[in-house]
Amino acid sequence: MPILDLTRAATEAAVQLPAEYALNDAERTAAIGTWRGRMINEHISARIFAGLIPQMMAADIGADHIKTVADFINEELTHAEKCAAVVRAVGGEPIAALPDLPPVPSHPECEPLEAFVRNLLSICCMSETVAVALIGAERLETGPDNIEELLRTILADEVGHARFGWRLLDELSPRIDDAMRIRLSDYLISAFQHLEEHELDHLPPTASPSRTAAAVGVCDGNDARRLFFECVETVIVPGLEKRGFDGRRAWDAAKTLRN
Ligand SMILES: [Fe+2]
Ligand SMILES: [Fe+2]
């Protein structure tokens, strides 16, 4: 199993937890687990953007957009280092085993543009938009100024990743004919199912162990779940509908399949 060891970057960043946020053992364990989990997720996000690049080339997407996605790879790797710095600040080692990494779906049954738009929808318009909502809310709860500032810089990048998706979707609209739009709307059902499964997996429905733990990033999982559903309903579904995709039907179908 590959090991992710970000000790060097975390040590260099030298983030310290202010004395007034001293953690007891349970709080420390929860905080280490939370930030180590984020460190892994951010790191493996880099590979998702890397997987998009050959698909963008095949789909005849402009070089400027490809360069932007290449920058996103670096940003996600940097987010992982920032999370590693917090792992260290709360008393943990920023070392973790990486999970199995399935490749970014290539959708071989689709032509290149449709295959790429599927992933653009799923990655930028869905996952990154949810990341903006969750990190934005968390930032408001964060106590220490240095961790809040670190989350602010991560959030600014995630906003860029989500906006990129919605804007590129607009730009590609003339290349998406009615038949492709219908097929993509059908695809959204499985994309929503995957999104919900993935997000809920990372948001256990448990309360934060304490106010101090919440202030250093161990959020209330129930609140985060509520925010996830609100983000889908009030941002993602309307955003898709506005662009001519049947987002409402797809989300409703995904919910029916789940029940
Ligand atoms: Fe990120
Ligand atoms: Fe991101």
Image (spheres, rainbow, N blue to C red):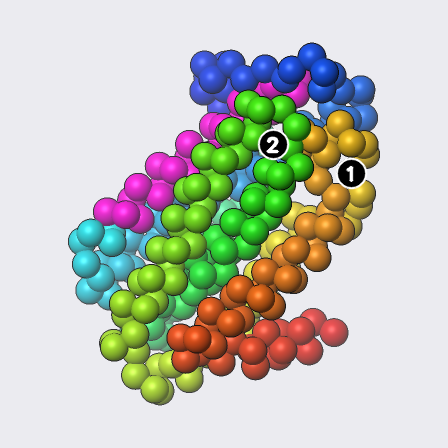
Q: What stretch is highlighted in magenta?
A: 67-93
Image coordinates of residue 54 in percent, x first then y, are 27, 55
Q: What residue is drawn where x is 27% and y is 67%?
A: 171
Type of amino acid under label 1: Ser
Q: In this view, does 122 lie above or below 10?
A: below
Magenta residues, dominant SS class: helix
Q: Nearer the viewer, residue 131 or 25?
A: 131
Residue bearing mark 2 = 36
Q: Nearer the viewer, residue 137 or 68?
A: 137
- In the image: residue 91, left or right of residue 54: right
Name which of mark 2 and mark 1 comes first in the sequence. Answer: 2
Disc 2 residue: CB within 8 Å of ligand 1: no
Image coordinates of residue 194 in percent, x first then y, are 57, 63
Q: Which quadrant would the N terminus be assigned to in this image?
A: top right
Type of amino acid under label 2: Arg
Q: In this view, does 218 lie above or below 22?
A: below
